[in-house]
Amino acid sequence: MAIPVAYNLRSAKERWTSSVVAVLGIAGTVGVFVAMLALARGFQATVTSSGLPQNAIVQRSGADTEMTSILQVEDVRIVEDAPQVARDDSGRS
């Protein structure tokens, strides 16, 4: 058995404050989600378009971000001596 439309309209009219709070809560959640996606997309576009293809980021094994990566002097020398590293005419990396 279906609930009559008149019942739904009277219920919404009687509880309009709860309905408004629910709508505003959902709209706020959607707004924050869209803002976070826009922020992530803007950050990705900035990182993608602002770097040179010749540049690389070197991180130690197991590091999640650049902030948690530490390279010792010996590690830097290993990276500098790698055959994939570009060098200028004087042989400097």
Image (cartoon, rainbow, N blue to C red):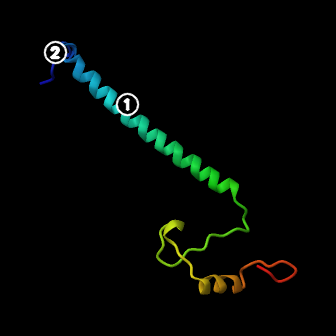
Dividing the picture into quarters, in which one does residue 11 lie? top left
Q: Position of residue 52 (x, y in %)?
A: 73, 62
Residue at 54% x, 67% y is 66
- Rendered position, 60 above or below 13: below
Helix, strand, or loop for circle 2? helix
For disc 2, the neighbor class at 10 Å (few under 14, some 14 to 19, many from 20) is few
Residue at 56% x, 47% y is 41
Most foreground residue, 55 or 5: 55
Residue at 52% x, 72% y is 69
Q: Position of residue 84 (x, y in %)?
A: 71, 81
Q: Work out how far the residue at label 2 is from the one at label 1, CA to CA, in angstroms.
A: 26 Å
Most foreground residue, 37 or 75: 75
Sequence-first disc among 2 and 1: 2
- Can you tell which mark lies on residue 7? 2
Task: Please state which amino acid type lies under the numbered disc 2.
Answer: Tyr
Q: Position of residue 54 (x, y in %)?
A: 73, 68
Residue denoted by label 1: 27
